[in-house]
Amino acid sequence: MTGQGTVLPGRVRAGVWSPAAAAHPGQDPEDDAANAVLAGLDPARREVVAGLLEQVYAGAVHDVLRVLHEHEVPPFDDGDEGTPFHDFMGRLLDAERS
């Protein structure tokens, strides 16, 4: 996966959810907690979590495209591979093969 859907998985893989919180601990308890959880995971487990985030992101984009298509919202009322959500999934599969 490339683009916006890689930001949060990239943070998980790096083991730091919030670089700002890592630089200034104590200012944001939620980010501190997320950083602590990620720091406690080995790289293999962080990879699993990152993969889950990628799946959730792709699923959400797919669902939004499906709803826009069903409501015939231009330009989501048509697609190259039948529907915009089929186009999206096709691009994801092509990117995974590359």
Image (cartoon, grey):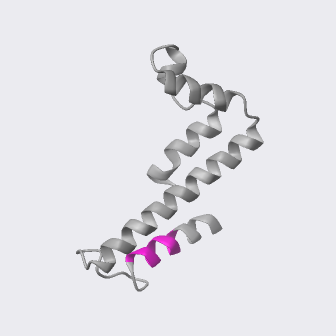
Q: Which residues are magenta?
A: 84-91
Of the 4 image quadrants, the one containing the N terminus is bottom right
Question: How many numbered badges does the structure rendering display?
Answer: 0
The location of residue 94, given as percent across then percent down, is: 57, 71
Counting from the top left corner in percent of width and height, residue 23 is at 52, 16
Rendered view: 50 above or below 37:
below
Residue 98 seen: no
* Residue toward you, 60 or 85: 60
Instruction: Look at the image and tell me whether residue 30 can be seen.
Output: yes
Please name the residue shown 62% across and 53% down the image. 52
Which of the pair 98/72 is nearer the observer?
A: 72
Residue 63 drawn at (x, y percent): 43, 68
**Which image quarter is the C terminus in?**
bottom right
The correct choice, above or below, for 92 with respect to 53 in the image is below
Residue 52 within the segment the image draws in magenta: no
Q: Which quadrant of the view contains residue 73?
A: bottom left
Report the residue at 51% width, 72% height from top.
89
| Chief secondary structure of the magenta portion | helix
